[in-house]
Image (cartoon, helix red, strand yellow):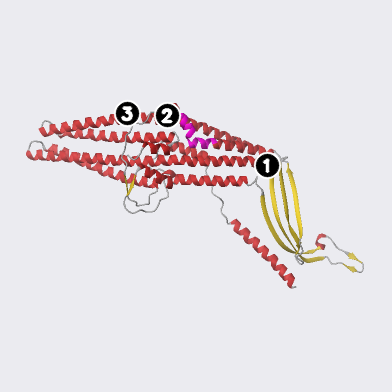
Amino acid sequence: MIRRFLLHRSIWMFCALALVTTSASAQIPAGPVTSSASDTTQSSSATSNSPVAPSQSTSPYQGSVPGKLEPGVLPISLQDAINRGLKTNLGLLLSSQDVQSARGERWKQLSALLPNVTTSSYVAGSQVDLAEFGFSFKFPGVTIPTIVGPFGYFDSRAYVTQSILDLKALNKTRAASQDLKAAQYTAKDARDLVVLAVGYNYLLAIADISRIESVTAQVNTAQALYNQASDQVQAGTSPAIDGLRAQVELKTRQQELIQAKNNLAIQKLALARVIGLAPGQQFELTDKSPYEPFAEMKLERALQLAYDSRSDFKSASATVHSYEYSAKAAKAGYLPTISFSGDYGLAGEYDTLGTHGVFDVRGTLSIPIFQGGKVHGDVLEANAQLEQSRQRLENLRAQIDSDVRTAFFNLESSAEQVEVAKSNIDLAQQTLDQSRDRFVAGVADTVEVVQAQEQVANANDSYISALYSFNYAKISLARSLGLGEQSVREYFKGK
């Protein structure tokens, strides 16, 4: 009786353990869903062509994982901003995790080709009623019981399975390897996009600082004009309307200065989000807006360099190879597979604890005959995806050509605009000086001076815009060539 009680208790313990294990497995969440390399490629091309205002963008490249608040006011150069962005920018961090996800998927597919070894042990107790199975023994004078047991036994084995020939699993593994390459190229391309986003926001902030300096100078000029006009009105040498005109001009410039300071404060917030500064972190920009002529490069050389260097193009090419292997894997569904399985262990009676070696070895040839059109559907789907990936690759090839040519046009045009705007500032300033001299001499009124001040203000705004466009065109060209990180460090060496 005691032995029977222990046997039943062991059986209940094994059942309870199996139930707990099953429940725990059911609560494990599914893995994350990863984005395809082609989707990332499309978003990369869009970002390189038309930067979106930071306050309106939902792109991960306009966000970051903020660091800790640092004491004092941080000096931030363009190179510092790029370094911080490459560590904390959300778009780059997400791309790095996509690489890990693709690496995990590759291991999952590879597991179908590698040996799978498991072990299991169990102990059982049984009691069988032979009458349940139709066995009834009746002999004259002899009583044979139909109840067998209870009896106990155990079995402990190691199992191994190995695929010998499975072209479907082999091509799926190759496709996963190409997906991993595509994810790695996409992560590398993300670094160029981070440089583009940081450079875009940093140059905008520099332009805002330049506008504040320009408007401040205009406020000072307007203040001096107002003082002169007030003195002449009080002296009776000028009509009162000259003083009113000068006062309106002064208030207008003061209003522009308030707006320029507000724009800079907002732009610095956008830059802080891109480079991962802590909320509330105080910082100042140390680089000014430099102008250096761009070293001439042949268009044909630039296009060849772009096709050789653009990581998004390499990612799209790897995606095409992945779908080629996926199409082969789908067609391999028609082919037979060969596998091997075997196990070895110990088994025996639970009561006597007797043991004996047991094993099982099996080779299996599986030949698909009819699968209801499943393989045909897989082939059609794989071929469609392959053709789509090829079309996306060719579209990206044309887009790269357009990106490089556009960058060349913008660079050439903005360089000419900088030169024209610079000379226009000198002419406008000379006009203003002469107008003020004429006003002081009493041969002109404030209308002429106010108009000259407007010309100086417009000339300064044009120069700032042209200088920003020129510097951003250099960053855009570096991005279109696929050399954003190293080229930007070369173009802007702490000016």
Q: Quadrant of residue 139?
A: bottom right
Q: Please state if 363 lies on the left or on the right of 256 as rendered.
A: right
Q: Amino acid at mark 3?
A: Glu
State the mark number for residue 416.
3
Residue 157 locus on image (x, y percent):
71, 57
Q: Quadrant of residue 425?
A: top left
In the figure, 408 relative to 35: above or below? above
Q: Are marks 1 and 3 in contact (CB under 8 Å)?
A: no
Inter-mark Cα distance, 1 to 2: 48 Å
The residue sitting at 31% across, 53% down in the picture is 72
Residue 144 in magenta stretch? no
Q: Which residue is denoted by mark 1 in the rendering? A: 166
Q: Amino acid at mark 2?
A: Arg
Callout 3: SS: helix
Q: Residues within 10 Å of mark 2 (few under 14, many from 20)?
A: some
2 or 3: tag closer to the N-terminus: 2
In this rendered view, identify the residue nearer to me: 205 or 245. 205
